[in-house]
Image (spheres, helix red, strand yellow):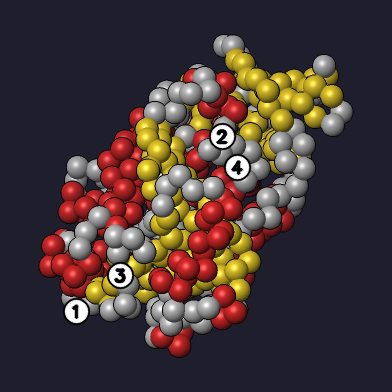
Amino acid sequence: MSSSSSKPWAIIVGAGPSGLLLGLMLAKKGIPVHLIDMSVKLDEQPRATHYGSPAMYELRRAGIVEDMRAQGFHPDTVCWRKLDGTYLAGVKMGVEHDPDRMVCLPLNRLGKILVDHIGRQPSATVSWGHKVVSIGQDDHKAWVICETPEGEKRLEAEYIIGCDGANSQVRRSLFGDKEFPGKTWDEQIVATNTYYDFSKFNWLDSNFIIHPEHWYMAAKIGNDGLYRITYGEMPGLTNEQLRDRQPWKFKAMLPGNPEPDQYRIVNFSPYRIHQRLAPSMRVGRVCLAADAAHLCNPFGGMGLTGGIVDIGGLYDCLVGIHDGLADDSILDKYSEIRRQKYNEVVNPISSANIVRLFGQDPDKALENDEFLQMCKRTETDEEFAKDFRYSANVLKHDFTQYYRKNPTNGDAKGANGYVELGKDSTSAAQVTAAGVTD
């Protein structure tokens, strides 16, 4: 087994969007980072697409928003409908000149932007084909043991950051293979990327359909007519059975009741959904972030946006330690507060988002659902609409307040400020579509 000759300050396990974002932000501060990933190249699957304003704030800090806007687009409105297309309520997703206005861009394209920017940073290294098999630490350093094309390697750093996704080996090394508390939903979902002309039915950019059987989401994810159609299915079916049922589902669900020759599916991905949170997001010199630390269902985009906000907070904590502005106890604050944000915001609100689609009578939804009533109010009350849009900032937290001395550059302060839990419970209750979908 060989050892690395030069020791970076941080090793980031996982070169997906969260790991690449953290690596870029640290490298731009001149902090030596080494990103490793078990894959041999960047993941080319589109996956999640919508970045809510708290995520856009962190991406703006990283200096990549202009590239994102050039390749993506700004979704206009999200709405809720009945199966027959009847409009119930909707919310405009942002104002034109908001610097943190939501952007829609598939994750694989964000990954390419991040890799391009990291390639310009002399203090960042990315190594593909490095599979972590174990981790360790002592009072002075942490390390990972990796299987690589050149054989087994031991890589050392001051800190190890697990950004290696839902099946995180870093998390498993800390807590065991089965210690990821939470639940798996009974509901089966199928995510598709589909070309279908919703515009001829006057549907909006993002549409959530309320129905006990045929509940789904149809969201525009590109400027070429591509939509993410994610729908609920019967549990217990094989992937082959789900594929066999898909034409019937689309004919029953979609406006116009289309036949298969009227749409084109380019991606079909059945999967189970979870609500889970790691016991801690910090163990000594090892931290977890994003999907490695917590999972939620995709409706409302809380997983993607919440994970990116994790990265921004962890970045501030690590910079504080590196620059002598904080001791490592700030990482305990990181774990405490990001877990609190999951328990009090991400988990309950993402759960409410999905149950809203199948767990109520669509004919009485506007009458009984307080959230939909608030959405309806945004259509006529501009001041309320503004507060409603910014309520997603409850996900954010300013970790620089725990520095021994306050930095003067204001790097961690967003233009829209922070909403702390307990200080504005109304805003917390209003958050729903931090994004639109993961």
> Which residue is tagged 3?
80
In the image, what residue type sits under mark 3? Trp
Residue 49 lies, with reference to residue 409, above or below; the image says: below
> Which residue is tagged 2?
167
Label 3 near label 1: C-beta < 8 Å? no
Q: In which quarter of the image is the N terminus?
A: top right
> Which residue is tagged 4?
19
In the image, what residue type sits under mark 2? Asn
Residue 2 lies, with reference to residue 250, above or below; the image says: above
Label 4 near label 1: C-beta < 8 Å? no
Rounded to the nearest angstrom, the CA distance separating label 2 from label 3 is 33 Å
| SS state under label 1 | loop
| SS state under label 2 | loop
| SS state under label 3 | strand
| SS state under label 4 | helix
Q: Pick whichever of labels 3 and 4 is earlier in the sequence.
A: 4
Tell me the crowding category of disc 1: few under 14, some 14 to 19, or many 20 or more residues within 10 angstroms, Cα based.
Answer: few
- Position in image of residue 242 (x %, y %): 52, 55
Q: Is residue 140 visible?
A: yes
Residue at image position (39%, 85%) is: 202
